[in-house]
Image (spheres, grey):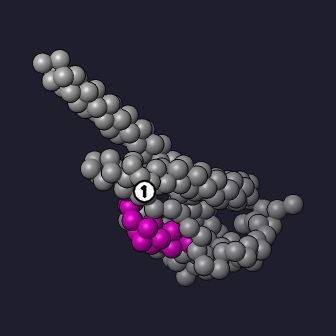
């Protein structure tokens, strides 16, 4: 009889330990996934800030007579394309890549707008235009930092989700690897940008 209770006691202890391990692992994964989701939201906030600045910049430039309409249209269309796209931390690597490509298209259109603005000295000297350029430059830096921060937070989460024995718990409860932000090809060479400021 004592032997039977001993076996039952050992089984109960093992079950409790396994349950505690599962609960601890699950809760840890939830916490890490929330950090990834928050970091991803921070990236989206910076992209939205840039989109809002682009709208303000286009409206400022429209005030300049005879400004090249095609350039304004391209920027507006690129902004609209980005505005239609929705992604979140659970988006696939391909979806994030498409989003980043759309953001890069908007950056290209914006660069052309700034280059054309060089031909309008009156526009370049307005306080509104100069302020927007400074804010835009700061926002580009914030985007880069937010993307880097996201990747740094996603990396340990992804490692944990794919490492045994956590991968078993992750698979059971639907935790999956998060996509990274990657640089577009050709971005290893920084473009030379002159905002016409000193």
**Residue 103, magenta (yes or no):** yes
* Residue under the point 39% across and 48% down: 166
Closer to us: 87 or 73: 87
Instruction: Let me know if residue 46 appears in the view.
Output: no
Q: Residue furthest right?
A: 198
- Disc 1 residue crowd, few under 14, some 14–19, many 20+, Cα 10 Å: some
Q: Quadrant of residue 13?
A: top left
Task: Give the residues drawn in magenta, as a range.
Answer: 86-104
Q: Is residue 137 left or right of residue 28?
A: right
The residue labelled by disc 1 is 162
Q: Quadrant of the N terminus?
A: top left
Q: Quadrant of the C terminus?
A: bottom right
Q: Is residue 121 left or right of residue 65?
A: right
Q: Position of residue 79 (x, y in %)?
A: 48, 67
Closer to us: 124 or 140: 140
Q: Quadrant of residue 176?
A: bottom left
Q: Is residue 71 above or below residue 129?
A: below
Closer to us: 24 or 35: 24
Judged by its main secondary structure, the magenta piece is helix
């Amino acid at each position: 009889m004592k032997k039977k209770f001993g076996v039952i006691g050992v089984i109960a202890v093992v079950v409790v330990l396994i349950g505690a391990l599962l609960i601890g692992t699950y809760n840890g994964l939830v916490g890490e996934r929330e950090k990834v989701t928050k970091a991803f939201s921070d990236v989206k906030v910076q992209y939205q800030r840039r989109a809002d600045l682009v709208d303000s910049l286009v409206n400022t430039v429209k005030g300049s007579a005879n400004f090249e309409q095609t350039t304004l249209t391209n920027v507006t269309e690129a902004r609209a394309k980005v505005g239609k796209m929705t992604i979140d931390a659970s988006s696939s690597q391909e979806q994030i890549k498409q989003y980043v490509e759309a953001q890069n298209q908007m950056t290209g259109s914006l660069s052309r707008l700034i280059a054309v603005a060089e031909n309008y000295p009156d526009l370049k000297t307005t306080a509104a235009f100069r302020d927007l350029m400074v804010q835009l430059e700061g926002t580009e830096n914030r985007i880069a930092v937010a993307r880097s921060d996201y990747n740094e937070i996603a990396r340990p989460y992804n490692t944990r989700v794919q490492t045994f024995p956590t991968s078993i718990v992750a698979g059971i409860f639907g935790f999956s690897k998060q996509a990274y932000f990657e640089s577009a090809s050709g971005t290893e060479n920084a473009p030379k940008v002159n905002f016409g400021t000193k």
